């Protein structure tokens, strides 16, 4: 019995020894502080008036430079136009044929697939590569953000966007 009574005490003493003792307590930098520094350098609100900037997306359209647009949009540089496809399966080389003539050729085409990322057909991938562009197929919510960032960096970028409410 004497051994059994000492066992809990032995376990407690071993647990105390196993716990590392703090040697130097330094607080980690606050992430909030890091983000607030970024907020102070707000490039998004200081874009030139002639640059397109997506400010909002909805299930049926987008807000660009304070103007609401319904339906799919095609953006080339700082030119914005309505785009025919209403669902992902309607995006074909023919629907993107404008990129055979646009100069300078955008370095990247951001394809906003709607609510979900969709696999791009090999035929469409070959067509986009044949124009000299790279392809980024992502959901439309992230597509408009990516477009804003690349456009604000001064890069030649294009976007083909289905409204966020579209899903296949």
Image (spheres, helix red, strand yellow):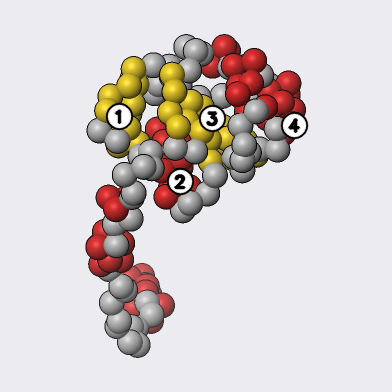
Quick one: 58 or 45, which is closer to the camera? 45
Marks 1 and 2, the one that precedes in the sequence: 1
Q: Quadrant of residue 1?
A: bottom left
Residue 63: numbered disc: 1
Mark 1 vs mark 3: give the one in front.
Answer: 1
The structure residue drawn at horizontal position 29% and vertical position 35%, both measured from the top left corner, is: 65
The mark lying in front, picked from 4 and 3, is: 4
Q: Residue furthest bottom?
A: 23
Q: Is residue 153 above or below residue 131?
A: below
- Crowdedness near tag 1: few (<14), some (14–19) or many (≥20) residues, C-alpha within 10 Å: some
Q: Earlier in the sequence, mark 4 or mark 2?
A: 4
Query: Looking at the image, which residue is at 28% across and 66% down?
Result: 37
The answer for how far apart the CA atoms under marks 3 and 2 are is 15 Å
Q: CA distance from mark 1 to mark 2?
A: 16 Å
Q: Confirm or deny contact between disc 4 and disc 3 (CB under 8 A).
A: no
Disc 1 to disc 4: CB gap under 8 Å: no
Structural distance between the alpha carbons of marks 1 and 4: 31 Å
Sequence-wise, the earlier of marks 4 and 3 is 3
Residue bearing mark 4? 130
Res. 111 mark: 3
Q: Position of residue 139 (x, y in %)?
A: 47, 30
> Residue placed at 44% from the left, 37% from the top?
78
Closer to the chain start, of discs 3 and 2, is 3
Q: Which residue is mark 2?
A: 151
Question: 19 or 26, which is in the foreground?
Answer: 26
Mark 1 → mark 3, Cα distance in angstroms: 17 Å
Q: Position of residue 130 (x, y in %)?
A: 74, 31
Compared to residue 33, the image places residue 88 above or below, namely above
- Mark pair 4, 3: CA separation: 16 Å
Instruction: Report the side of 145 relative to 64 (left or right).
Output: right
Q: Residues within 10 Å of mark 3 (few under 14, many from 20)?
A: many
């Amino acid at each position: 019995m004497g051994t059994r009574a000492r066992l809990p005490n032995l376990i407690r003493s071993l647990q105390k020894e196993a716990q590392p003792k703090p040697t130097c307590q330094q607080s980690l930098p606050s992430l909030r502080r890091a983000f607030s520094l970024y907020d102070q350098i707000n490039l998004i609100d200081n874009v030139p008036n002639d640059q397109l900037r997506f400010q909002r997306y909805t299930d049926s359209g987008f807000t660009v430079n304070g103007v609401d647009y319904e339906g799919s949009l095609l953006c080339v540089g700082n030119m914005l136009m309505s785009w025919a496809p209403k669902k992902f399966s309607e995006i074909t080389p023919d629907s993107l044929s404008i990129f055979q003539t646009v100069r300078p050729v955008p370095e990247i085409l951001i394809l906003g697939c709607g609510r979900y990322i969709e696999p791009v057909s090999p035929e469409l991938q070959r067509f986009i590569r044949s124009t000299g562009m790279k392809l980024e197929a992502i959901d439309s919510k992230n597509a408009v953000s990516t477009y804003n960032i690349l456009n604000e960096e001064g890069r030649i970028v294009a976007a083909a966007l289905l409204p966020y409410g579209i899903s296949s």
